[in-house]
Image (spheres, rainbow, N blue to C red):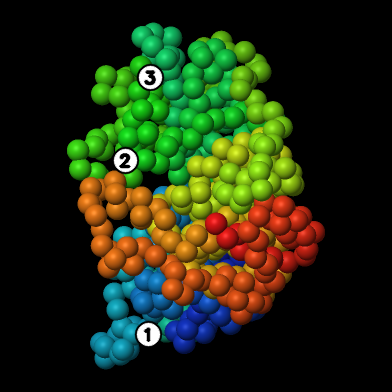
Amino acid sequence: MTFNGAEAFVATLSACGVDTCFANPGTSEMQLVAAIDRQPGMRAVLGLFEGVVTGAADGYARMAGKPAITLLHLGPGLANGLANLHNARRAASPVINMVGDHATYHLHFNAPLTSDAAGVARPMSDWVRLAQSPRDLAQAGAEAFVAAMDWPGKVATVIVPADHAWGAGAAPVAPRAVPPAPRAPDAAIAAAAEALRGSKGPVALLLGGRALRADALHQAGRIAAATGAKLICETFAARVERGAGRVALAKLPYFAEMAVEFLAPYATILLCGTEPPVAFFAYPGKPSELSPPDAQVVRLAGLREDALAALTALADALDAPIEPVGVQVRAVPPVDEALTPLTIGAVLAELMPTGAIVSEEGLTASAALFDATAGAAPHDWLMVTGGAIGQGLPVATGAAVACPDRQVIALQADGSGMYTCQALWTMARERLDVVIVIFNNASYAILNIELMRVGVQNPGPKALSMLSLDHPRLDWCAIAAGMGVPAGRVDTTTAFRAAFERALATKGPVLIEAML
């Protein structure tokens, strides 16, 4: 059997275990489109904007633990998807980008879409490769898979010149072995145990990355049983496995002064799967580093080391009990009739099914939603890891593709939702089981808060108008209808509860616009 470069490339990725492509192709990618069409078992999911494509690949990777491929149109198309590649990179999600480019002999003509595609890719990719020939494309695919699977995941980008895609004489290559997850050194385990035993005051375990999976949290709970340590989740985590029956943990506050106060009591802060905590932004007269100046900060395992193995080894070194402390009990907060993020969270805590996946981009509502749902049935919680807004709806899309047997719930602020509202169309087209809750407060509310926090005094109407989403107010029911998603509007807790119950019972996506 003969292959062109595109066919060999896609067949190689399929042999590596890649079975999903999120696509927004153009003319230069037609050979790749045809190759995906001919590849048995390869699912193609169209996104109407590249930010949806890259965000969906991130959500897919967070839940599947392996990469999907994106199909993007030259440098400008890739540029449209960079914000969510930034989030994917911060989440350590395995993603493989296929980016078409002009035929090599056409580049010197400087046609309108000519750009430095590799240069566009580098800031938001961990690994970039320009294919050198039709035969080299398959090699690039095998290398990209290994690069993307570098523990726990990286963004790998392959630039595919059109003539290499259509060129004949290529053949698939065998998958390459993926290296095992690196382990924290024995010395790091011993140093952590010594620090916990000898701490001169309260101890905190700040957890991120793979340390937030249920098995790793079980080991963290054992350590807490032995040391009394407080378990803390990093502020923006890729995926937290939480809910009733799992080891509970508090979340580090977003605002710097609150985070400083939160961490102030701790004499020793042990890091696993995350970096020392810093403020999200700089503020006049406020610190960038959040740990107490006199605290002992100890690194157990970094993001790219096996957190489960490190926590298990540390628990054993401490002769910790087999059973953890701090296991979350089933609990639902009380509610009143006024519709707020807290009452919405309480309804979620009551009704979310076991195994639900929550993609949360609530911004100002985030803290209330996270706290209110602590006692919900066991679920996964996905956050905006890199702070680039417009992630929530695409990540929900990708998670639903990865886990078709699980209910996905997207908790979405109105302003950030407008960045990638095209994801609703993909949800409708693919019949994905996603309940979308839009928090419509007609404002970039977080920026109104930040305006005061950076010291702006007496902002005038022009400044405030740049933070308002009113006049006209966004009509998310109309937007959803235009994308093929049924929707309804609610303004009381009773109405929200009824709408949420109906949405859970409906096959395919449903949007609830919560008027706050």
Q: Residue at x 56, y 80 (%)?
A: 33
The vertical placement of 468 against 328, above or below, is below
The residue at the far right in this view is 505
Q: Which residue is mark 2?
A: 279
Relative side of 348 to 231, left or right? right
Indicate which disc, 1 or 2, sits on the residue closer to the N terminus: 1
Q: Quadrant of the C terminus?
A: bottom right
* Residue 443 numbered tag: none
Whether residue 376 appears in this view of the structure is yes
Q: Residues within 10 Å of mark 3 (few under 14, many from 20)?
A: some
Indicate which disc, 1 or 3, sits on the residue closer to the N terminus: 1
Q: Residue at x 36, y 63 (%)?
A: 467
The vertical placement of 153 against 215, above or below, is below
Relative side of 351 to 456, left or right? right
Q: Which residue is mark 3?
A: 265
- The secondary element bearing badge 1 is classed as loop
Badge 3 amino acid: Pro
Q: Residue at x 58, y 75 (%)?
A: 479
Q: Which residue is mark 1?
A: 103
In front of the other: 137 or 355: 355
Q: Residue at x 51, y 71 (%)?
A: 474
